[in-house]
Amino acid sequence: MRLHREGFTIIFVTTLVLALLNYGMQAWLGEGLVSQIFLGISLFFFIMVVQFFRNPSRTTPEGEGLIIAPADGKVVVIEEVEEPEYFKDKRKQISIFMSPVNVHVNRAPVSGKVLYYKYFKGKYLVAWHPKSSTENERTTVVMEEGGKQILFRQIAGALARRIVCYAKPGMEIARGGEYGFIKFGSRIDIFLPLDAEICVNLGDKPVGGETVIAKLR
């Protein structure tokens, strides 16, 4: 299993702490039932941390105008909204919620140049809260493909306290290319032109970098 570089330090520290705790438990209580139970709990916790930082390879569909899911998760919002930060007009919004068991690598939904990037400090409301899109810690990226601009926003959740975004203005990113990572659960909003054809439904579970969620007309 390939691991994401964002997890190397956390996995190392987790391994060290758990090893010291288990050594201390065995030195104090011996190799009894309590120590064995604690070892089992430690192994489960370690596996959960490691699986969170897995980084599987993905095969991205090719084709003009395809909008690819930027993350694994569940579609929780499909609606027409006012986008107040960059476009300042009506857009179609698709939101994908990532639980702690999802892959948290974030991938570019289109191919093209990064036109805009901005980071916002903020709150840590639960990711499905209606105000999380405008009040939580977040990053906004805008890219252009085929003359149409797409905005996508990483949003921190109640557990996620570290958003990583590699995209910067002027950078060229291929569709499905890695552009960021959110640690420990959150959500991504995608804002599309009103004439975009939506290809997913509420409750669908797209695969980041592979699932076509919309098509530009």
Image (cartoon, helix red, strand yellow):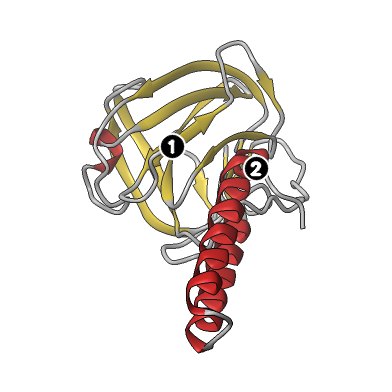
Residue 200: x %, y % from top left? 51, 58
**The N terminus appears in which quarter of the rendering?**
bottom right
Q: CA distance from mark 1 to mark 2?
A: 15 Å
The residue at 22%/48% (across/down) is 130
Residue 32: x %, y % from top left? 54, 87
Tags 1 and 2 in contact by the CB under 8 Å rule?
no
The residue at 46%/38% (across/down) is 195
Could you tell me which secondary element the residue under label 1 belongs to? loop
Mark 1 or mark 2, earlier in chain: 2
Residue behind mark 2: 8
Res 83 → quadrant: top left
The residue at 52%/47% (across/down) is 197
Could you tell me which secondary element the residue under label 2 belongs to? helix
Can residue 82 be seen by looking at this rendering?
yes
Residue behind mark 1: 162
The three-letter code of the residue at mark 2 reads Phe
Residue placed most toward the observer, 68 or 181: 181
Residue 62: x %, y % from top left? 77, 42
Residue 43 vertical placement versus 180 (above, below): below
Residue 84 vertical placement versus 62 (above, below): above
In this picture, residue 102 sits left or right of residue 160: right
Direction top: furthest residue: 170
Res 170 → quadrant: top right
In this picture, residue 52 sits left or right of residue 129: right
Residue 189: x %, y % from top left? 41, 41
Can residue 192 be seen by looking at this rendering?
no
Residue 54 vertical placement versus 137 (above, below): below
